[in-house]
Image (tube, rainbow, N blue to C red):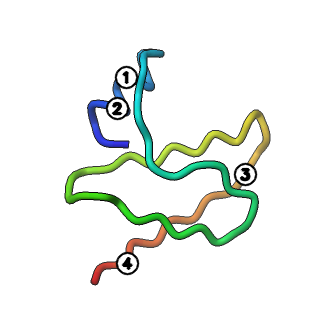
Amino acid sequence: MDIDHYQAYLDGGEYEYYGGFYDVSPVVLEVPYDDYWYLVVDSNGQRVKVWVTEIFD
Protein backbone atom coordinates (compact mmCIF):
# COMPACT_ATOMS: atom_id res chain seq x y z
CA MET A 1 0.00 0.00 0.00
CA ASP A 2 1.14 3.52 -0.52
CA ILE A 3 1.11 5.90 2.43
CA ASP A 4 -2.43 7.22 1.89
CA HIS A 5 -4.00 3.78 1.62
CA TYR A 6 -1.91 2.45 4.49
CA GLN A 7 -3.17 5.26 6.73
CA ALA A 8 -6.75 4.52 5.68
CA TYR A 9 -6.13 0.83 6.51
CA LEU A 10 -4.89 1.81 9.98
CA ASP A 11 -7.87 4.12 10.47
CA GLY A 12 -10.36 1.44 9.42
CA GLY A 13 -11.36 3.35 6.28
CA GLU A 14 -11.51 2.34 2.63
CA TYR A 15 -8.20 1.52 0.99
CA GLU A 16 -6.75 -0.04 -2.13
CA TYR A 17 -3.93 -2.57 -2.21
CA TYR A 18 -1.87 -4.56 -4.68
CA GLY A 19 -1.40 -8.25 -4.19
CA GLY A 20 -3.97 -10.65 -2.87
CA PHE A 21 -4.31 -14.00 -1.15
CA TYR A 22 -1.34 -16.33 -1.46
CA ASP A 23 -1.08 -19.86 -0.13
CA VAL A 24 2.32 -20.65 -1.66
CA SER A 25 5.77 -19.32 -1.05
CA PRO A 26 7.77 -17.49 -2.21
CA VAL A 27 5.57 -14.66 -3.43
CA VAL A 28 6.97 -12.08 -5.82
CA LEU A 29 5.26 -8.69 -5.70
CA GLU A 30 5.89 -5.85 -8.12
CA VAL A 31 4.99 -2.31 -7.18
CA PRO A 32 3.06 -0.44 -9.90
CA TYR A 33 4.97 2.85 -9.55
CA ASP A 34 7.89 4.38 -7.68
CA ASP A 35 7.01 5.48 -4.15
CA TYR A 36 7.42 4.35 -0.56
CA TRP A 37 5.37 1.19 0.00
CA TYR A 38 4.04 -0.61 3.06
CA LEU A 39 3.84 -4.38 3.10
CA VAL A 40 0.90 -5.61 5.17
CA VAL A 41 0.65 -9.29 6.01
CA ASP A 42 -2.69 -10.36 7.44
CA SER A 43 -2.17 -13.85 8.77
CA ASN A 44 -5.79 -14.20 9.88
CA GLY A 45 -4.77 -14.79 13.48
CA GLN A 46 -2.09 -17.35 12.66
CA ARG A 47 1.59 -16.91 13.53
CA VAL A 48 3.71 -16.56 10.42
CA LYS A 49 7.33 -15.74 9.63
CA VAL A 50 7.99 -13.19 6.90
CA TRP A 51 11.23 -12.51 5.03
CA VAL A 52 11.51 -9.58 2.64
CA THR A 53 14.13 -9.19 -0.06
CA GLU A 54 14.37 -6.12 -2.26
CA ILE A 55 15.32 -6.77 -5.86
CA PHE A 56 16.25 -3.83 -8.05
CA ASP A 57 16.48 -3.91 -11.84
Residue at image x 57%, y 65%?
Answer: 51
Whether the residues at callouts 1 and 3 have beta carbons within 8 Å, the answer is no
Give the CA distance from mark 4 to mark 3.
22 Å
Mark nearer the viewer, 4 or 3: 4
Query: Where 42 sits versus 37, above or below?
Result: above
Mark nearer the viewer, 4 or 2: 2
Q: Which residue is mark 4?
A: 55
Whether the residues at callouts 2 and 1 have beta carbons within 8 Å, the answer is yes
Position of residue 10 measured from the top left corner of the image (x, y, whole percent): 44, 23
Disc on the earlier residue, 3 or 2: 2
Residue at image x 30%, y 42%?
Answer: 2
- Under mark 2, the amino acid is His
Instruction: Identify the image quadrant of residue 41.
Output: top right
Disc on the earlier residue, 4 or 1: 1
Q: Nearer the viewer, residue 6 or 20?
A: 20
Position of residue 35 measured from the top left corner of the image (x, y, whole percent): 21, 53
Q: Secondary structure at mark 4?
A: loop
- Under mark 1, the amino acid is Ala
- Crowd rating for badge 1 (residues with CA inside 10 Å; few <14, some 14–19, many 20+): some
Query: Where 34 sits versus 56, above or below?
Result: above
Whether the residues at callouts 4 and 3 have beta carbons within 8 Å, the answer is no
- Under mark 4, the amino acid is Ile
Q: Which residue is mark 2?
A: 5
Q: Which residue is mark 1?
A: 8
